[in-house]
Image: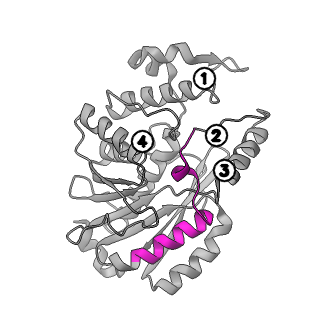
Amino acid sequence: MATKPKLHPRNQHSDGYDFARLVVQTPELETFTINNPAGQTTIDFQDVRAVRMLNRALLKTHYGIDFWDIPAGYLCPPIPGRVDYIHYLADLLADSNNQEIPRGRHIKVLDIGTGASLVYPITGQSEYGWHFTGVDVDAGAIKSARQICELNRLAIILRRQSKPENIFRGVIQPKDAFHMTMCNPPFHASAEHANKGTQRKWANLGKGHSTKLNFGGQDAELWYPGGEIKFIARMVEESMEFADQCLWFTSLVSKKDNLQPLYRILGKAGVADYQVIEMAQGQKTSRFIAWTYIKKNHRSLLTN
């Protein structure tokens, strides 16, 4: 696994934020801009309103989204890192398509835990024209995502997962076929762990003590009994039932230590192949794991 030195080469945000351009597109952002010690324009990333306004400006300027907002308390994701996942998924599909990225609505993607922000379907549809189905257990998140779709006239399917213990069951229908599933799983084991993780993050950034959860988030977005490893293990278990309905199952993995147990779980599931793709985003390295039950010589037929 080779670590990428920075954001994906196709990531529109690889050179940082162009605040002058963003403010032209979204004048309200200017109220939240400040100068850092080096004299560069930025925002206070501890200010939830500022982060939300930056996201609104980024989505309008780079992805053609005229309306974007989320209810208070929901996860407000950092756009550049989220888009990296999309670009590396495109590369994964290209591997089965003579190194050419498949584009267009015939490429079907299932976003597990799409959230109130709908960030993956928005950016993936804009960059590659893929067709997305977004799933979430939270009724408020689905309501917010539906509003974003309606006000921007986005053709994205939204489904509510009525049973929180399930991931694919109940939302993948018998006639569905997906090229990829994607997921940013809850990585804390409890609300207490989520709060402690936030305190460590603020301390590491030299911000001192904060009662705020970094970028917000509801319970279902932040924690799951047993944490990330249990969630992805459940995902692998359920993926076996839909092995012939999806080319690649994927999930972000926040903790590198979780990879070894996941390898063992995938081995027991009898997958045809799996890969780990690492992504470097500033000082942070993230990664996603991808697995398939489709043999290599049959994958090219599915991307055409």
Of 98 and 285, nearer the camera is 285
Q: Nearest to the eye among marks 1 and 3: give it.
A: 3
Cα distance in 3D space between marks 2 and 1 = 20 Å
**Residue 143 is covered by the magenta coloring:** no
On the image, the x and y values in percent for residue 190 come to: 65, 57
Tell me the quarter of the picture where residue 210 sits.
top right
Mark 1 or mark 4: name the one nearer the start of the chain.
Answer: 1
Q: Which amino acid does label 1 sit on?
A: Thr
Pointer 1: what residue?
Answer: 42
Horizontal side of 162 relative to 177 (left or right) equals right
Residue contact between numbered discs 2 and 1, judged by CB atoms under 8 Å: no
Cα distance in 3D space between marks 3 and 4 = 19 Å
Pointer 2: what residue?
Answer: 213
Of 241 and 126, nearer the camera is 241
Q: Nearest to the eye among marks 1 and 4: give it.
A: 4
Residue contact between numbered discs 3 and 2, judged by CB atoms under 8 Å: yes
Mark 3 or mark 2: name the one nearer the start of the chain.
Answer: 3
- State which quarter of the image contains the C terminus: bottom left
Q: Give the range drawn in magenta.
A: 216-239
Question: Can I make out residue 1 in this image?
Answer: no
Residue at the spot 25% in from the left edge and 70% down from the top edge: 302
Mark 2 or mark 1: name the one nearer the start of the chain.
Answer: 1
Chief SS of the magenta region: helix
Cα distance in 3D space between marks 3 and 2 = 8 Å
Pointer 3: what residue?
Answer: 194
Q: Which amino acid does label 3 sit on?
A: Ala
User: Callout 3 environment at 10 Å: few (<14), some (14 to 19), or many (20+)?
Assistant: some
Examine the rendered structure and indicate whether residue 177 appears above or below residue 13: below
Q: Is mark 4 on a helix, strand or loop?
A: loop
